[in-house]
Image (cartoon, grey):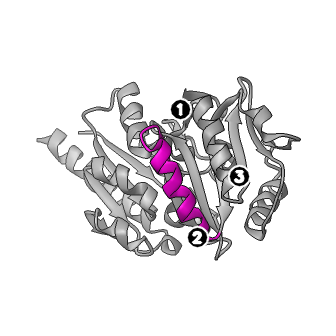
């Protein structure tokens, strides 16, 4: 039986500096060359993944924006786009403004990915914008009126503020659009004290993206092994044969784990994959001989 390994990035595959270690990159490079079925599922965009995963020849597409896109890593081409209904985007945008917040808008305009911003009203938003501009993320552009971006395929609204404010906003969004959207609220581990609320279409989840991926690549009979650290990984933990949390994972996620390994700072995900892959190859070799 084939095995498909899917890992979250931040706090899981990556170290605390948001970098894939040279050790992990080297091992993954070797295993991928041997035929390893491996990909990543992250809230990040393909643009930032291309930088941190440079040099890895992933045979499978990556899952970005928590499942809003299924994309080819090298080219950035989107194979699947799960965008939010325009009328829902407009309604949620009005709610966001009512709660004294301003979103970043991530979209696909038919040709390229875009990330729009207008007013930057707090240090959490400034950190994010500066991080992306410093990284020379080509998606970002200032716009006079955010609603002008709503005619594009909007895949994510990102609101950054303090926890209580976002909890109340999230409740209001769920009450009005809970059946058509997916929301995630978590602290930015690189900018403590500031929380991110991301709003996606209801089809934009990691579990649904994994199901689509294995179906499109005729891997339905494969064992699914997933790795994560945050509550937005719960749904993919529920569908996996083996759901593996890193030691630093959220306590809620660990409830759904079949195994807890070392922390993200110890290359624990790649060490596990290396050992598990080696064991499976040895078993296959032994079976073939018999």
> The residue tagged with tag 3: helix, strand or loop?
helix
Name the foreground residue: 62 vs 183. 183
- Image quarter (top left, top right, bottom left or bottom right) of the N terminus: top left
Identify residue for label 3: 97
**Which comes before the other along the chain, label 3 or label 2?**
3
- The answer to which quarter of the image holds residue 242 is bottom left
- x and y, in percent, of residue 218 in the image: 34, 26
How far apart are the two marked residues, 1 and 3, measured between alpha carbons? 24 Å
- x and y, in percent, of residue 24 in the image: 53, 61
Q: Which residue is most to the front?
A: 98
> The residue tagged with tag 2: helix, strand or loop?
helix
- The answer to which quarter of the image holds residue 10 is bottom right
Residue 10 in sight: no
Q: Main secondary structure of the magenta part?
A: helix
Asked if residue 115 is positioned above or below residue 127 in the image, the reply reads above
> The residue tagged with tag 1: helix, strand or loop?
loop
Name the foreground residue: 164 vs 151. 164
Identity of the residue drawn at 45% across and 39% down: 202
How far apart are the two marked residues, 3 and 2, measured between alpha carbons? 16 Å
- x and y, in percent, of residue 132 in the image: 78, 55
Residue 82's tag is 1
- The answer to which quarter of the image holds residue 126 is bottom right
Asked if residue 108 is positioned above or below residue 5 in the image, the reply reads above
Identity of the residue drawn at 49% across and 68% down: 267
How far apart are the two marked residues, 1 and 2, measured between alpha carbons? 27 Å
Q: Answer whether residue 165 is magenta in the image.
A: yes
Region rendered in magenta: 162-182
Label 2: how many Cα within 10 Å (few below 14, some 14–19, many 20+): some
- Image quarter (top left, top right, bottom left or bottom right) of the C terminus: top left
Identify residue for label 2: 163
Label 1: how many Cα within 10 Å (few below 14, some 14–19, many 20+): many
**Which comes before the other along the chain, label 1 or label 3?**
1
């Amino acid at each position: 039986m084939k095995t498909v390994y899917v890992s979250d990035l931040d706090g899981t595959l990556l170290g605390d500096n948001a970098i894939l270690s040279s050790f992990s990159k080297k091992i993954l490079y070797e295993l991928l060359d041997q035929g390893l079925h491996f990909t990543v599922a992250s809230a990040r965009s393909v643009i930032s993944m291309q930088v941190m995963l440079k040099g890895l020849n992933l045979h499978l597409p990556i899952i970005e924006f928590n499942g809003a896109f299924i994309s080819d890593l090298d080219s950035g081409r989107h194979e699947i786009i799960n965008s939010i209904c325009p009328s829902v985007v407009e309604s949620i945008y009005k709610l966001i403004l009512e709660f004294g917040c301003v979103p970043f808008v991530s979209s696909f305009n038919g040709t390229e990915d875009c990330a729009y911003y207008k007013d930057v009203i707090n240090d959490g938003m400034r950190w994010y914008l500066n991080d992306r501009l410093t990284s020379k993320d080509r998606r970002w552009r200032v716009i006079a009126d955010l609603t002008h971006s709503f005619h594009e395929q909007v895949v994510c609204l990102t609101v950054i503020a303090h926890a209580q404010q976002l909890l109340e906003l999230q409740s209001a969004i769920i009450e009005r659009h809970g059946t058509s959207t997916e929301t995630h609220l978590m602290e930015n581990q690189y900018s403590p004290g500031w929380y991110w609320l991301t709003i996606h279409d209801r089809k934009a989840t990691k579990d649904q993206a994994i199901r689509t991926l294995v179906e499109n690549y005729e891997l339905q009979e494969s064992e699914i092994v997933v790795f994560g650290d945050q509550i937005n990984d719960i749904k993919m933990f529920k569908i996996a044969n083996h759901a593996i949390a890193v030691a630093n994972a959220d306590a809620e996620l660990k409830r759904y784990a079949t195994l807890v390994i070392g922390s993200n700072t110890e290359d624990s995900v790649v060490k596990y994959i290396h050992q598990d892959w080696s064991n499976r190859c040895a078993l296959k070799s032994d079976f073939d001989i018999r």
